[in-house]
Amino acid sequence: MPTPSVYVQPADYATYGIAETVTADMVGQATSLINAFLARPGGLLYSVDFAGNPAYMAGKTTSFVLLAGSGGVPSGQNVVVPYSGPTLDNNSVGEVVIIDRTNEDLCEACVISAVGTNPNTVTLYNVQNVHGDGARMELGLTLSEQKEMPKDRSTTLLANLPVMNLQSGVGRYGYGRRSQQISGSFQEMNLLAVVSSFGGPPLWIPWTVTDAGLNRNTGEVWVPAGILLAYYTEVKIWYTSGYSYATLPDQVKFACANVVKALKETGLGPNIKNRETRDGLKSSKFENNIIDANTREMLRPYRARILA
């Protein structure tokens, strides 16, 4: 079954000092507050596929669902699957679909390598299991970033660390930027001029993630060059990051417990500045954040790099 997207599970309530004060809803609320502070809507926990490999983020929400048509999803390479659901286009090439997410024996992540629109079909690069008619193919559950590549370089940085695995990547070409452009003319006699002469936006071209270089701890990705050994102008990368619950750092679990305690003790809510009881007892909050300064410092190493 999918990994629960909470940072303290019931078996560990006593270990982190919240056994007598906690409800499952409060732990879920505390986890959501932490994710907001970390700027990581997908959270820190990943869920695994049938083989135990990181497949998608436990805290992510499905954006679209495709239902496999008659014949289901056979196993193999470059599998063409008719589906019902929203019509996709070239912008979906490279997307990762999670098939049969709720079935731990069949769940797997597959990459869309091509899209057909008459009728609606997707070509999946590699399928390891056989999935039946109506199998759910869910999009939006992995992390994805669209990055402009630096001038004349083929490296970029991902925002969410540690990176567990690269699942898919696509790139496209654009006109030279700023000093690379010929003043007053865009008809540069090179590969990009040939591509642009057909009109419309440039197509996304898949590249092989196993040919890429990855530093899991820094998030630096070396992207292989495309056709004619030209570096891409833009890339999109799909990946998973973070931890399993077993490997989630203790300081994140303690931080979650701290937020749970704060939710319990706050009572009237985190934005109350002053409060007086009928017995004359006065209390006030020093800041309007339910996550105190010490807890924020515990969590800071896991924040997403907004400007990566």
Image (cartoon, rainbow, N blue to C red):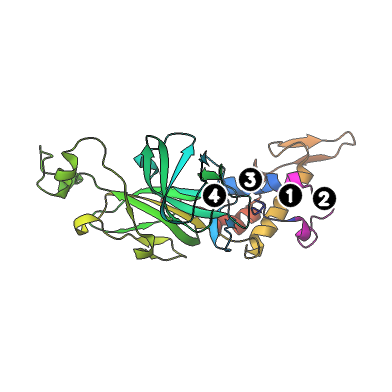
Q: Quadrant of the image for the N terminus?
A: bottom right
Q: Secondary structure at mark 2?
A: loop
Secondary structure mostly seen in the magenta stretch: loop
In primary-sequence order, the first of circles 3 and 4 is 3
Q: What amino acid does circle 1 point to? A: Val
Residue at image mark 3:
33
Report if the CB atoms under discs 1 and 3 are less than 8 Å apart. no
Q: Secondary structure at mark 3?
A: helix
Q: Magenta residues?
A: 10-27
Tell whether 173 sits left or right of 40.
left
Q: CA distance from mark 4 to mark 1?
A: 34 Å
In primary-sequence order, the first of circles 1 and 2 is 2
Q: CA distance from mark 2 to mark 3?
A: 18 Å
Q: Secondary structure at mark 1?
A: helix
The one nearer the camera, 152 or 91, is: 91
Q: Residues within 10 Å of mark 2 (few under 14, many from 20)?
A: few
Residue at image mark 1:
260
Report if the CB atoms under discs 1 and 2 are less than 8 Å apart. yes
